[in-house]
Amino acid sequence: MTPDRRSSALSVARSYVRRLRAVRLRGSQALHRRVGDAGRYWSDDSEIGWRANSHWRGGLPDPDWASVGSDHLAIFDTFAKALDLPRRPAIVIEWGCGGGANAVAFAPRCSHFIAADVSADSIAECIRQVGQVCDTPATGLLIDINDPHAATVGRENTCDVFLCVYVVELTAGPEEALRILDAAQHMLTDGGMALIQVKYHTTDPATRGHRRNYRRNLANMTTFAIDDFWIQAARHGLTPRLITLVPQNRLDVRYAYYALTKP
Ligand SMILES: C[S@@+](CC[C@H](N)C(=O)[O-])C[C@H]1O[C@@H](n2cnc3c(N)ncnc32)[C@H](O)[C@@H]1O
C-alpha cells in the first residue's frame, strides 16, 4: 500500500470510529418514555411542524404531497402485478393515514377505505380529502398508541390491502414497529398484501434509529437492516414476497418497500 492510500484508509477508519462513538454516546431512552413522547406529539396539532410531519395538504407543499400517493400507487401496482393480485382491491386500510396523501390515490381504486391513525384530527382530514376525489366510503379507525392491537379486535381477516408508509421510522423503537406487522397479520384476508415502507440503515452507524429525543428525531427513530425486516415479517406470520429500494425520494432517504402476503 502506498503511503497516500494508507493515510486515506486510516482517515476513513478514524471517521467510522468517531461516528460509532457518537452513536454510542447518544444512548437510548426507555421505551415507555419514547412511546409517551410519541403519543403526546401526535395528539397535539399545535406542535411545531405537526401538519408537515402528518403529511397534511398544505403542510407539505402540493408537488410533494401529490407525489406521496402517486409514488406509492405505482409501487403497489408493480407488486400487485408481479404477485397476480387485484389492482382494484375491495378493502384497503392505511395504518397511519395522516392527512390523506395516499388515501386520495388508493381510495378511488377500492370499494372501502379505512383511515387508521393515532390522531383523530388526521383521520378526519384524511376522510375529508377522500371525499374531495371520489365516492368511495371511508371510515376512521383510531389507534391507541399504547395498545395498537385493540384497534384490530373484531376486524380479523377483513382487509385486502394493508398500507403503512412513513410510519415505521417514527415508531418509538423496533418493538413498536413490529406491532404493526402483528396488526397487518391480524387484519389481512388470506392472500391479502401488506405494503410496508421501512427506513433502512446501512453499515454506517450514523444511519441507525436514534431511540431518544422523540420530537427532534421523529423521522429517524426506528430503522431496520434490509434483511432484518424481511426476517421479522416472516416471524410475525407474513410471507415476504418482494422488495423495492428507494435510496432517495422527494421527502427523505433510504426507503425499503416490502410486499408481504398473508399465507
Ligand atoms: C409522516 S405521517 C404519514 C402519513 C401517511 N401515511 C403518508 O404517507 O402521507 C405519519 C402518520 O403516522 C401517525 N402515527 C404516528 N405514530 C403512529 C403509530 N404508532 N401507529 C400508527 N400511526 C402512527 C401520525 O399520527 C401521522 O398521521
Image (cartoon, rainbow, N blue to C red):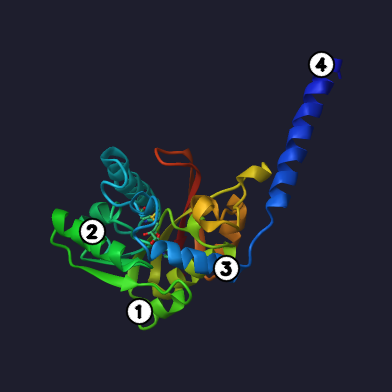
Q: Residue at x 35, y 79 (%)?
A: 155
Viewer-nearest of discs 3 and 4:
3
The residue at which mark 3 appears reads as 33
Q: In front here: 163 or 37? A: 37
Q: Could you give the CA–CA distance between mark 3 and mark 4, rounded to whole angstroms?
A: 48 Å
Q: Nearer the viewer, mark 3 or mark 1?
A: 3
Q: Nearer the viewer, residue 53 or 65?
A: 53
- Sequence-wise, the earlier of marks 3 and 1 is 3
Of the two numbered discs 4 and 1 in the rendering, the one whose residue sits closer to the viewer = 4
Marks 3 and 2, how far apart in space?
35 Å
Disc 4 target residue:
4
Instruction: Find numbered disc 3 in the image and state the secondary structure of the residue it sits on.
Output: helix
Q: Are marks 3 and 1 in contact (CB under 8 Å)?
A: no
- Neighbourhood count class around disc 3 (C-alpha, 10 Å): few under 14, some 14–19, many 20 upward: some
Query: Toward which corner of the image does residue 161 lie, by quadrant?
Result: bottom left
User: Ligand 1 falls in which quarter?
Assistant: bottom left
**Alpha carbon of mark 3 to alpha carbon of mark 1: how far?**
29 Å
Whole-number angstrom distance, CA of label 2 to CA of label 4: 58 Å
- Mark 2 residue CB less than 8 A from any atom of ligand 1: no
Q: Which residue is mark 2?
A: 107
Residue at figure coordinates x 50%, y 61% from the top left: 171
Look at the numbered discs 1 and 2 and tell me whether their residues touch, using CB distance below 8 Å. no
Residue 56 image position (x, y, % from top left)? 29, 52
Q: Earlier in the sequence, mark 3 or mark 2?
A: 3
Mark 3, mark 2: which one is toward the viewer?
3
Q: Earlier in the sequence, mark 4 or mark 1?
A: 4
Measured in 3D between alpha carbons, the distance from the residue under mark 1 to the one under mark 2, in whole angstroms, is: 19 Å
Badge 4 crowding class, 10 Å Cα cut-off, few under 14, some 14 to 19, many 20 or more, is few
